Image (cartoon, rainbow, N blue to C red):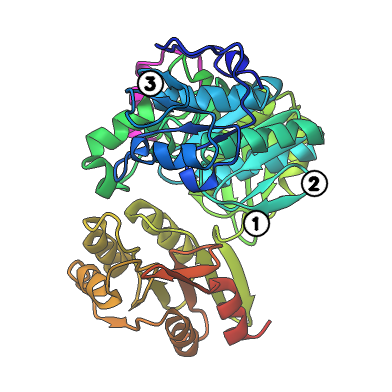
Amino acid sequence: MKAKSLFTGVRIMCESDLDSLEIKDICLNSGDVRPSCLFVAMKGRKSDGRAFAAAAEAEGACAVLTDKKIDGITVPQIITSDVRGAYAEICGNFFSNPARKLKTVGVTGTNGKSTVAYLVHELACACGIRCGLIGTMYVHDGERRTPATLTTPDPYELNSILASFVKSGCVAAAMEVSAHAIYWRKTENILFDLGVFTNLTRDHLDFFGDMRSYAEVKKSFFTPEHVKKAVINSDDECGVELINRASVPAITYGLYNPADVFAVNISQGEECSYVVNDRDCLMEINSRLLGAFNVSNTLAAIACVRELGASCEQIAAAVRNIAPPEGRFNVYRRGDKTYIIDFAHTPDGLRNVLTQARKLCRGNLILVFGCGGDRDRTKRPLMGRIAGELADKIIITEDNPRTERREDIAAQILQGTEKEASVINDRRQAVGYACKIARSGDVVVIAGKGSEDYIESFGVRTPYSDREQLLKVIGQ
């Protein structure tokens, strides 16, 4: 591709001859550079890409994108004041701006991103609207799914995936947009048709420092530069702030506060049934997704899929057949005992899951959980306190300790747990012990990892699945 075409829409400050420069690929890592690549010298929190420009040139880079002139290299330097924004823009151009050929739905919030994006994808496809999915769990083009790398991929991978969606016949795409992705401007080149806000609760303070900074990053997504229309949770305090200051048209959804899309007559047993009023369109819903939080997630998805063109009749018929997403309040029953696997890894998420689990419980509520290492440490005692308040028996275990000791993380959780708790650092043993002590009418909640298939400790990812371990213990 000619550099002039690649840099369409990018403000550059250089005299390089873009007309004659041919670029065959784009690379961020000097180790990935091939001949005729553009090397993007981007500064991150831990390293500066400019330090690797010479290595990139040695590997065959034909040009370098940078914000300052780099000494010691001879290839053309394309200088811009905003390398990160330029990178997103050129990745879009490189793949022929696939997002512009799709109806795009970007979902952000602390909890519920994966479930809402999944539901938009599943509902849209069931209603005849082929919709791709990019999320924490996997990537799906409407027919095939592949493993995910990050919640929100790097702009190069992201645009590559969107281009594959277009090629495979998708007309829409739903994706999770994490706070980190907004901060690092991974979706800078995409103007989403719909931006969904689920909620804001405590998380990622190891990165953002405080709740105010975290909230401002989330709020910054809901501007005319990023979304055409918003779908906002009216039951969330930050959501109400967004509604009151909305600079884009907004559809509201909620269970407790006035909203454009709401549910009444909620009844839960083996399934969850309720009536949805979506802007005066009534739907009788029967869903396999249990819990008030999942009713809220479903409302968000319904609002989106109606905007994509599905009818109320199509949606109501489709919801019944949709299974819960992997690792999100997955319920297993063996005799008179119930087992639940959920991704809950924040204080609010854990509270929601335990509150719903209690409704299924006739005996003791047994909880197995831990907290991830190298992440927000302040939430550990908070989650310990919630466990003590809502569970009858608590087993604290590992959950991706990364570069921290499992024992240290458990000790920090215990600081907030006023109730007696067991510490079994090996997660396999912890799940086995919880199942062993379960009695008639008990519910065992295994929280924190959901559909993850590994435990990460000191740079090593050891294969592990809560689901596989549970089924092994209780018998498939």
Q: Are marks 3 and 1 in contact (CB under 8 Å)?
A: no
- Which quadrant, please, contains the C terminus? bottom right
Image location (x, y in percent) of residue 271:
65, 56
Amino acid carrying mark 2 in the image = Glu
Marks 3/1: CA–CA distance = 50 Å
Residue, disc 2: 143
Which is closer to the viewer, label 2 or label 1? 2
Image check: 91 left or right of 436?
right
Residue 124 in view here: no
- Which quadrant, please, contains the N terminus? top right
Q: Are marks 2 and 1 in contact (CB under 8 Å)?
A: no
Q: Quick one: label 2 or label 1, which is nearer the N terminus? A: 2
Q: Quick one: label 3 or label 1, which is nearer the N terminus? A: 3
Q: Is residue 238 magenta?
A: yes
Image check: 210 left or right of 32?
left
Residue 307 in view here: yes
Residue 26 placement: quadrant: top right
Magenta stretch bounds: 236-254
Residue drawn at (33%, 39%), measured in percent from left and top? Answer: 51
Residue drawn at (35%, 32%), measured in percent from left and top? Answer: 72
Label 1 Cα neighbours within 10 Å, binned few <14 / some 14-19 / many ≥20: few
Amino acid carrying mark 1 in the image = Glu
Residue 229 placement: quadrant: top right
Image location (x, y in percent) of residue 142:
76, 42
Residue, disc 3: 82
Which is closer to the viewer, label 2 or label 3? 3
Q: Quick one: label 2 or label 3, which is nearer the N terminus? A: 3
Which is closer to the viewer, label 3 or label 1? 3
Marks 2/3: CA–CA distance = 37 Å
Q: Secondary structure at mark 2?
A: loop
Residue drawn at (55%, 67%), measured in percent from left and top? Answer: 453
Residue, disc 1: 271
